[in-house]
Structures are given as structure tokens and as C-alpha cells.
Image (cartoon, rainbow, N blue to C red):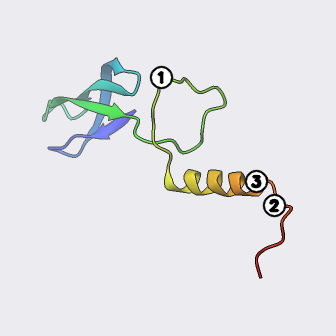
Amino acid sequence: MKMRCPHCKSTAHVRSSYEVSDLSRETYFACSNTACGHTFAAVTEIHRTLSPSAIPDPKIRLPLSKHVRRKVLVEQLMTLPTSPMPPPA
């Protein structure tokens, strides 16, 4: 993983990282420009699901992306049983 240095805009490379929680990680970066020498920390956080897991962990609560919610709703509506009663006149 790379980021740009916020000061000189050179590439900054990962030096180390650690898991903060199941959904976040803190990463330490060092600027590749030796004249700049900036080192900094960034937090990466998982904030929504784009494609649901086939083996979900019940402890993990992530909102679904809008396109996923729409797809799930359509799939649920398609599997609903049809009513044996005719529609009202």
C-alpha cells in the first residue's frame, strides 16, 4: 500500500501497521523523499459491504452498500409466494 506524502506529494511507503479492531488498522508511512523525511500514521477502516460474505461473522455489523440493498430487496420480492386470492376489483 502506498500513499502520497501530504507535504511534498512524493510516494510514502508502509513501514509497519497493526490491527486496532476487526474493522480498522493503523498504518505507519515514511515519505520516500529524503529531503522531506515526513513520517505519519493513517487509519484504514472498513465502512460498508459491497458484496456480502458467504461465511459471515455474526459479530461484525456493517451496513450494506445501496446497490447491494436494492439487489437483496429485488431477490426477496422475487421469492415471495403469490397470493391464491384474485386482486380486488
Q: Secondary structure at mark 2?
A: loop
Q: Which mark is residue 28?
A: none
Residue 2 is situated, as x and y percent measured from the top left of the image, at 36, 35
Q: Nearer the viewer, mark 2 or mark 1?
A: 2
Residue 32 is situated, as x and y percent measured from the top left of the image, at 25, 32
Classify residue 23 by image quadrant.
top left
Residue bearing the label numbered 3: 80
Q: CA distance from mark 3 to mark 2?
A: 9 Å
Q: Give the left or right position of residue 65, taking residue 55 as reference.
A: left
Q: Nearer the viewer, residue 70 or 36?
A: 70
Residue at point 58%, 51% (across, down): 68
Residue at point 86%, 61% (across, down): 84
Three-letter code for the amino acid on which mark 3 is drawn: Leu
Q: Nearer the viewer, mark 3 or mark 1?
A: 3
Q: Which mark is residue 59?
A: 1
Mark 1 Cα shell of 10 Å, populated few (<14), some (14-19), many (≥20): few
Q: CA distance from mark 2 to mark 1?
A: 37 Å
- Give the quadrant of the C terminus: bottom right
Q: Secondary structure at mark 1?
A: loop
- Give the quadrant of the N terminus: top left
Q: Is residue 77 visible?
A: yes
Residue 26 is situated, as x and y percent measured from the top left of the image, at 29, 24
Classify residue 38 by image quadrant.
top left
Q: Is residue 31 visible?
A: no
Residue 33 is situated, as x and y percent measured from the top left of the image, at 21, 35
Mark 2 Cα shell of 10 Å, populated few (<14), some (14-19), many (≥20): few
Seen in the picture, residue 26 relative to 72 is either above or below; the reply is above
Q: Which mark is residue 83?
A: 2
